[in-house]
Amino acid sequence: MSTAAIETLPRVEPQASLRHQYVIFAILVALAMVMPFAIYPVFLMKGLCFALFACAYNLLLGYGGLLSFGHALFFGSAAYVSAHAAREWGLTAELSILLGTAYAAVLGLCVGWLAIRRHGIYFAMITLAIAQMFYFFYVQAPFTHGEDGIQGVPRPPVFGIIPTVDDHVFYYIVLAIFLASFLLIYRAIHSPFGQVLKTIRENEPRAISLGYRVEHYKLLAFVLSATLAGVAGATKALVFQIASLTDVFWAMSGEVVLMTLIGGLGTIFGPIVGAFFVVGLQNYLADYGSLVTIIQGVIFVFCVLVFRRGFVGEIAKRIGKPL
Amino acid sequence: MFDLLGISAPAFFGQLLIGVINGSFYALLSLGLAVIFGMLHIINFVHGAQYMLGAFTALLLLNYLGIGYWWSLLLAPLIVGAFGIVLERVFLRHLYKLDHVYGLLLTFGIALVIEGTFREFFGSSGQPYGIPPELAGVQNLGFMFLPNYRAWVIVASLVVCFGTWFMIERTRLGSYLRAATENPALVQAFGINVPLMVSLTYGFGVALAAFGGVLAAPIYQVSPLMGINIIIVVFAVVVIGGMGSILGAVVTGFVLGVVEGLTKVFYPEASSTVIFVVMVLVLLTRPTGLFGRA
């Protein structure tokens, strides 16, 4: 690939103070604690699941510079496994989610191992094609119930004791899952691993010449991203009590790219903003059919042409601090 | 031989024919993608939508202006190609200095807009488009029946693919094109209008997709979703063949169509996934693709 880096990503100074990020994080957590008293908790849980999905995706595209166009595979597959575990095997909530996540991790390892053999747009086409292959597989596989999906998934108690049927209670469990995963991503980005990942994004040949095994870093980023996308999908299956083909469809892969892009590629908080924006948009336009698709397309075009930094990236540039 | 394998000869040749037909479309579309990628370094995600637009243009020309199949075969690629040139001038030209992935994202967005709009107006279900009366009959080949229209599709696709190959590899215009692919600045210094050439190349690639769409209209239903369903398969075809070679794209397209058709005979459950499986196998053994350059 001749142009190695995605140009508009904000360059984060390693020494820059990150205190303002802790403040923002604390405000967001406080906000998240009181939100269910004002807003329908199922909507909030949907937003949190997609926010986690987008954050996981951002780790790969925003920090690793790898455009996967098949991330719905990990999200939707984990949803299937977690729904199946809860419904057919009667497992507890945390075990169902863990099982879905583990499946996404294994898939991530296989797909990543294949896809990192090619760069740039080939990488995107390969991930899209493999995801489509699994989509066709899930259409035919008996355990997914084809077009119907796995419906009527129960919400088993967490650890067998904490009941989750009440949306207000389950919301805080979903929030805990989100926060734990978010902190893991935050830690990964600011670790030596994250720094090397950014180096690869900016200049891969340079990273190779410095002696880094670029393939290992890319693969680890891919697996980590797929695993966390799996956490999001597995949780979402229990929130909505359904796992269906929509979750593994290419359109879902497109949506997560859109969320990350409009929130801000390579920013910490951008994907959260982007996810809630897109989920809110879908909610608002739910009755208008294809209009959602058209508007999403227009936002894509708009973002790529004039708004490549996204909401949070644009603010970060104004205030001159990484967000 | 067929009795041994437990399938009938007509079923075998029938699926083989469907395979070659699908292969014609894979070849036309991957050829267009390769031509566009060679010049613009953009993966044209709207390609499927433009194929769909070709079919719809033919349908609308027939329904509203009474223009038949043969004129549509000429007019639809021109109209959709012109639309492609507008897209290139208005949107794509801003991306040439950016990372390639932005081209993919932008064209994905345009595809969503086009397909969403057509779904809004025409619904998701397909609409029939009649076979032209000149090609209505069937030939009895002894071992199978060959509908005339299907034979025409194969011939037309082969001729267009060969013509494109000839134009790019054997003519003066093609040599300008190949030179501009290698080093646009130098070619421009020789007084050749490279930006115009880029626009026309994109328009030509788009016209190929629209031509495929018109060819497909009488075989498949004309539906807003026909493009996106085929384009992901074509991406896999392109990964398998590599985009470095025109002939490679065409050969890979036809071969994979046949592979898909034969899978339908021997193991129907895998027919929708077989091309992706081949892609995985090729990635394992020859990561740059069968005809690709590293």
Image (cartoon, coloured by chain):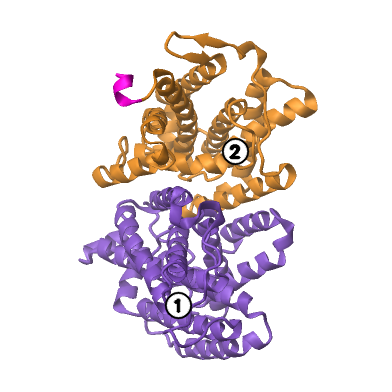
Residue beneath the point at 57% across and 37% down: B199
Magenta-drawn segment:
B1-6
Kindly identify the amino acid type of the residue bearing the numbered disc 2: Gln
Tell me where residue B282 appears, x and y as whole percent.
29, 42
Residue A36 pos. (x, y %):
63, 85
Q: Residue B228: name its quadrant.
A: top right
Figure colour of chain A: purple
**Image quadrant of residue A208?**
bottom left
Instruction: Give the structural element (helix, strand or loop) at label 1.
Output: helix
On the image, the x and y values in percent for residue A2 come to 37, 52
Q: Which is the main secondary structure of the residues drawn in magenta?
A: helix
What label does residue B50 carry, if any?
2
Task: Tell which subunit mark 2 falls on.
Answer: B
Give the number of the mark in front: 2 or 1: 1
Image position of A127 with respect to B17: above or below: below
Residue under mark 1: which chain is it in? A
Q: Amino acid at mark 1?
A: Ala
SS at badge 2: helix
User: Label 1, on which residue?
Assistant: A93
